[in-house]
Image (cartoon, grey):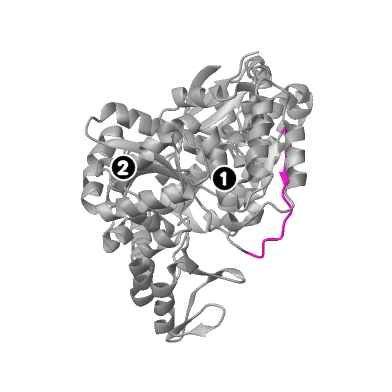
């Protein structure tokens, strides 16, 4: 494979994190770097008690019962008992057969960061953790997988239950369809065995996903954690009670969102806090808790005392929402760095003051690596098109317009025409302001009419040019659709299956070698014949 990189020039607040935008400083712990993470671990060391470490290790070992683990994983789990061991964590929904390939990129990004940290640090040890979003109830979102250009779906009635508890009923059809779409290649039989071993029969999707990740990344010591655990929830009781009694999450996050908006005028919150930011688990699934008068409403009205008593007696029946989950994660883990997608990082940036109020160390945030994997045929077609890979990181409409301009023998620059027109009308307005201001309205109306005329002329021109160069444009559009199926980046659509079928574990080695953490770069891997 040949690797190249494309710089991300997005000015979004999240990518400012990777560019050390000083305006972000008050909303984060520090900017992502190996040195900063190593330094940050000293803060977490003071906070995370021996008792917490014992509880964590005991629960992890309980969750791995019946699963064959590598010596690397065993060492990583046991090392968490040591006060100098810290985690780097990513996580995701329990997507079927891992879902879109960026699920894999999250894990690889975490492995790469941990590997480099352990090379650089002599005093601390770092371990990779993958957090299962087992308490999520959006089954439709995780039940789809796209392979060989075909979208497959697991049809099942879940009654709004947490997805981690779902069993394997009715999964046979989608397994068969998935295996039929796997290309016949060097490692296809290994992939089929992985699917059969982990998905044909399981008591919970959480256990199946843990086992699947364990087998895929057997040698890398990735610790997979299911936080839907009574032992873990016990450590979070005081935080949930504080939410009921004081509403700290809502108050602090709302204030921080307001502060971010003052600094970043275009910022739109990824998630807004609620009055109560955790759910109750019941017979009807995951139910929101809402304030109601002096008490609360779940499936029925209850008093504040009743809710507090339930939290004390049965903490496992409660589940933090998307805003509160990060605090829960950082409470039960000795975590120093969170690796997420841009959407995740966007809402984590809203949370630092909430962590400070809760007296939990806020981790260093970083964006996972991204990649486009391109076949040799598409690489050749890009070269033939006269374009470069970075030309395809814009909207399809703009790409085709730019390519049309490149192909056209008529060198018409409509932007220049607009500028000339605007300059002329500004001159007329200046004269009118000096002589007769009442004339400005007529000038503006004529200006608008002329600009509309240029817009219409431009549309007609490009339409005629598209017809003239339709064959060339069709080839460019096909390349774009390959990289962005349904106008969605490839990594958010395709499953890793066929790539694994062809390259096996070498796929992970190649990604680990080529990923560059903490840099605003997209990896492009060009496959060879």
Relative to residue 106, is residue 127 drawn left or right? Answer: left
Indicate whether residue 158 is drawn in magenta. Answer: yes
> From the viewer's perspective, is 405 left or right of 313?
right
Residue 343, x across and y down, in percent? 48, 48
Q: Quadrant of residue 1?
A: top right
Q: Quadrant of residue 477?
A: top right
Task: Report if residue 53 is visible in the image.
Answer: yes
What residue is drawn where x is 59% and y is 24%? Answer: 504
Q: Quadrant of the C terminus?
A: top right
Residue labelled with disc 2 = 86
**Nearer-the-camera pick, 385 or 20:** 20
Q: Position of residue 431 (x, y in %)?
A: 47, 47
Is residue 246 found inside the magenta-colored segment of the image? no
Residue 27 at what x, y percent from top left?
Answer: 31, 52
SS for dot 1 = helix
Q: Please report the bounds of the magenta region as a residue range.
A: 148-160
- 381 lies above or below 488: above
Point out the tag, 1 or 2, that comes first from the N-terminus.
2
Q: Residue at x 61, y 23 (%)?
A: 374
Element carrying mark 2? strand
Residue 434 in sight from this viewpoint? no
State the predominant SS element of the stretch in magenta.
Answer: loop
How many residues crowd around disc 1 within 10 Å: few (fewer than 14), some, or many (20 or more)?
many
C-alpha gap between disc 1 and disc 2? 23 Å
Q: Which residue is mark 1?
A: 209
């Amino acid at each position: 494979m040949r690797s190249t990189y494309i710089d991300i020039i997005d000015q979004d607040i999240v990518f400012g994190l990777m560019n050390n935008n000083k305006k972000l400083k008050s909303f984060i712990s520090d900017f992502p770097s190996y040195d900063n993470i190593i330094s940050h671990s000293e803060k977490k060391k003071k906070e995370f008690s021996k008792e917490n470490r014992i509880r964590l290790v005991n629960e992890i070992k309980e969750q791995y019962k019946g699963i064959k683990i590598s010596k690397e994983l065993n060492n990583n789990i046991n090392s968490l008992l040591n006060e100098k061991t810290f985690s780097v964590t990513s996580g995701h929904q329990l997507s079927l057969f891992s879902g879109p390939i960026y699920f894999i990129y999250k894990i690889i990004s975490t492995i790469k960061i941990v590997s480099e940290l352990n090379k650089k640090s002599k005093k601390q040890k770092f371990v990779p953790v993958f957090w299962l979003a087992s308490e999520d109830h959006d089954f439709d979102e995780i039940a789809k997988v796209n392979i060989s250009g075909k979208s497959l779906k697991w049809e099942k009635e879940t009654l709004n239950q947490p997805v981690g508890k779902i069993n394997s009923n009715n999964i046979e059809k989608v397994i068969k369809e998935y295996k039929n779409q796997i290309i016949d290649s060097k490692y296809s039989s290994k992939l089929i065995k992985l699917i059969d071993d982990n998905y044909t029969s399981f008591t919970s999707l959480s256990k199946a996903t843990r086992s699947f990740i364990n087998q895929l990344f057997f040698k890398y010591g990735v610790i997979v954690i299911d936080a839907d655990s009574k032992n873990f929830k016990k450590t979070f009781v005081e935080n949930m009670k504080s939410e009921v009694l004081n509403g700290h999450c809502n108050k602090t996050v709302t204030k921080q969102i307001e502060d971010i908006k003052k600094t970043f005028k275009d910022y739109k919150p990824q998630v807004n806090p609620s009055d109560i930011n955790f759910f109750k688990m019941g017979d009807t699934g995951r139910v929101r808790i809402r304030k109601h008068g002096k008490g609360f409403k779940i499936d029925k009205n209850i008093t504040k005392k009743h809710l507090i008593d339930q939290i004390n007696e049965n903490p496992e029946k409660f589940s933090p929402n998307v805003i509160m989950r990060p605090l829960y994660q950082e409470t039960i883990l000795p975590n120093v760095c969170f690796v997420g997608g841009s959407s995740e990082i966007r809402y984590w940036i809203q949370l630092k003051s909430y962590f400070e109020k809760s007296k939990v160390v806020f981790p260093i945030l970083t964006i996972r690596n991204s990649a486009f994997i391109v076949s040799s045929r598409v690489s050749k077609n890009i070269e033939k098109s006269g374009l470069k890979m970075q030309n395809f990181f814009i909207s399809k409409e703009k790409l085709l317009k730019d390519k049309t301009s490149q192909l056209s023998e008529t060198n018409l620059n409509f932007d220049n025409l607009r500028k000339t027109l605007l300059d002329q009308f500004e001159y007329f307005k200046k004269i009118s302001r000096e002589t007769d201001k009442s004339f400005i309205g007529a000038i503006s109306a004529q200006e608008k009419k002329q600009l509309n005329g240029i817009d219409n002329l431009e549309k007609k021109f490009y339409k005629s040019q598209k017809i003239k160069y339709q064959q060339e444009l069709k080839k460019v559009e096909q390349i774009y659709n390959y990289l962005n199926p349904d106008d969605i980046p490839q990594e958010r659509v395709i499953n890793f299956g066929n790539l694994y079928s062809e390259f096996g574990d070498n796929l992970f080695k190649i990604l680990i070698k080529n990923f560059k953490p903490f840099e605003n770069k997209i990896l492009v891997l060009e496959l060879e014949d």
